[in-house]
Image (spheres, helix red, strand yellow):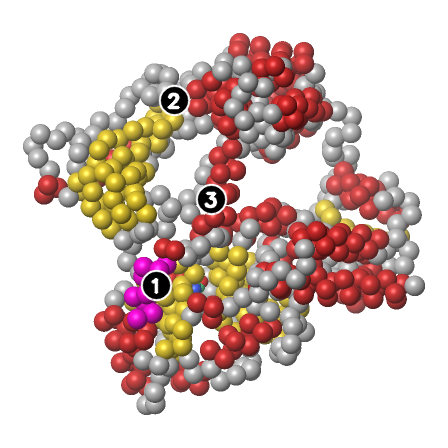
Amino acid sequence: MPDNIQQKIESLREELHQHNYSYYILDEPSVSDFEFDTKLKELQELEAAHPEFADPNSPTLRVGGGITKNFPTVQHQYRMYSLDNSYDFEDLEDWEKRIIKTIDEPVEFVAELKYDGASISILYEDGKLSQAVTRGDGFQGDEITNNVRTISDIPLKLKGDFPDRFFIRGEIYLTRKNFEKINKSREEEGLDLFMNPRNTASGSLKMQDSAEVRKRGLSAVLYQYISEEFPADTHWEILAKAKNWGFRVSEDQAKLCKTLDEVKEFITFWDTARHKLPFEIDGIVLKVNSLKQQRQLGFTAKSPRWAMAYKFKAEKVETQLVSVSYQVGRTGAITPVANLKPVLLAGTTVKRASLHNEDIIKKLDLHEHDFVYVEKGGEIIPKIVGVNTEKRTLLQTPIEYIKFCPECGTELVKIEDQAIHFCPNELHCPPQVVGRMIHYVSRKALNIENLGGETIEQLYREKLIENPADFYTLKKEQLLPLERMAEKSAQNILDGIEKSKEIAFEKVLYGIGIKHVGETVAKKLVKNFATIDELKNATLEELCQVEDIGMKIAVSILEFFSNSENILMIERLRSYGVKLEKGENTNEVLSNVLEGKTFLFTGKLSLFTREQAEEMVEKHNGKNISAVSKNLNYLVVGEKAGSKLKKAQDIGTITILDEQQFLDLIG
Ligand code: AMP
Ligand code: ZN
């Protein structure tokens, strides 16, 4: 029987790997989404019931879920070099001359796109993804295997005739579309927007929760094979092979060039065509095709002599400043924006550019109606990089930064060590009022689904809500007249609001938006102050005694509770039944007996469920991890424990407990 189940699990895995490949790499789905999901679910259930057959490369792990607190540092077996840069064709001609000095036979080049993301080195052993490491400083990087497993473009298992052990390198990036999607949802949650796809991609790779990484929708492309031995004589052939093993490779948009002239054509083509790509590139990478020639050329202290990056010039145009307007963000931060005479730049018409803050305006010495240079760099929003002062007349006056909030007229404040101006009218400045309510309903706070930023703005404009307590008095008759509001969505909103009364106190505390009280601080506060009244009555001293609460946070809490409008809102929330005190079964820590210890449960448990077990570990300040490794302290085994038990025994340093022994341990 178990044999049968193991076979079933393995064949499902095999089948799902194949479908993933067809879908993500070939772009030709081989089954319907529904069929795929059904099979995936079947596999998930079997795996949950039979942990002894676990496999770190199962397609079910694509969805993520493992948490990594600290990413281990890993030495690169082969150093990850940088690339030399060139900026014009003359640089390239010089490079070719240097090559010809060493190599006296014809040289071919592979021209590839220079993907603008984060580089990664992935180790495959026996056709399975075994480790993924960031570039780091080139000598060592961070191991982010679990996060990389969630990226659909990266095969967990290879096909065909692959070498036993090799590294493959490539770039993890975000498409423009997914980048915009992320920013849109951040905007709705009232969070700061990300600057550009590149930083977002590398930041995403370092998130602790791999399920969150999955949601970012990262892409990957592989462009270099490294190992003791090579499966072909040229880079071009290896790319083709890697493609057959199941990788998405740079070859798809690359070209094998016999002469430097062909290289130049390729560059000229992509210099304009790049704007139509669904992702960003910042240049072209050229590589000598023959591996023998690559070895002859070798490396400088920093980079291979056989490769060269060609960087595109950031496109720059001149246009005229029409006016400067000021936006008030949901946190009260003021952003100056330049309105420009429309101009074509990098394939799109630009009408506005960010000016960031007053210091930047001063540095540019920007005057009314100046002619300015606009550039599109790595950022999505173009920026002003200079002024054509020759075109300035004596009549033009310098731009004067505003003193009062354009939304509510309150005098602005400039925080000393920041360059940014704020509107201090938190409770009545319209964008801030809306921002506060959006924050209240956001997922990590009261999690009121179906109530998006636009609806909140509408409700505010209709004067139906002004602070979070007002949500609880909304009636269906008030919602229905709103734009695009059907009976069903109105009911969903009301249901969501009703459900929020069950949300734990710590999330409510985070949701009411006390400045500097983020998720973690809210949790710490609730540990020390069980009710909102205790918190309200706490003195500065008492607040500062709480772990991680410093002066800045403590003062902000005191200020919050000294405002009568906030007190009124809290009293109203209380009267509607919102939780303002700690419940009995919150995740409080019962003891520290397991502090610093890691646990993993395997086999069929009979005294408690896996979830209960993991909860117990957390309540006694231990940590659950998801795989057997040297980092594991205790493996708790139930009936029919399989491969994990064996692996733990092989490692030798792991304490193996049965269920009763585990209970004894936590007393
Ligand atoms: P730089 O960071 O400017 O030194 O450029 C080197 C980086 O370019 C490498 O670390 C890779 O992350 C990246 N890169 C992007 N596309 C390619 C490609 N097709 N081949 C090699 N490196 C690439
Ligand atoms: Zn204001």
Work out how far the residue at label 1 is from the one at label 3, CA to CA, in angstroms: 23 Å
Q: Which residue is mark 3?
A: 180
Determine crowd level at label 3: few under 14, some 14-19, many 20+ residues with C-alpha closer than 10 A. some
Q: Is 189 placed left or right of 490 in the picture?
A: left
Is disc 3's CB within 8 Å of ligand 1?
Answer: no
Determine crowd level at label 1: few under 14, some 14-19, many 20+ residues with C-alpha closer than 10 A. some
Eyeballing the image, is 420 above or below 80? above
Q: Which residue is mark 1?
A: 270
Which one is nearer the viewer's eye here, 138 or 264? Answer: 264
Q: For residue 653, say whether it is visible.
A: no
Of the numbered discs 3 and 2, the one sitting upstream in the chain is: 3
User: What percent of the width, then of the height, locates residue 173?
Assistant: 48, 56
Amino acid of disc 2: Cys
Q: Which residue is mark 2?
A: 423
Classified by dominant secondary structure, the portion drawn in magenta counts as helix
Q: Is residue 64 magenta?
A: no
Q: Which residues are magenta?
A: 265-274
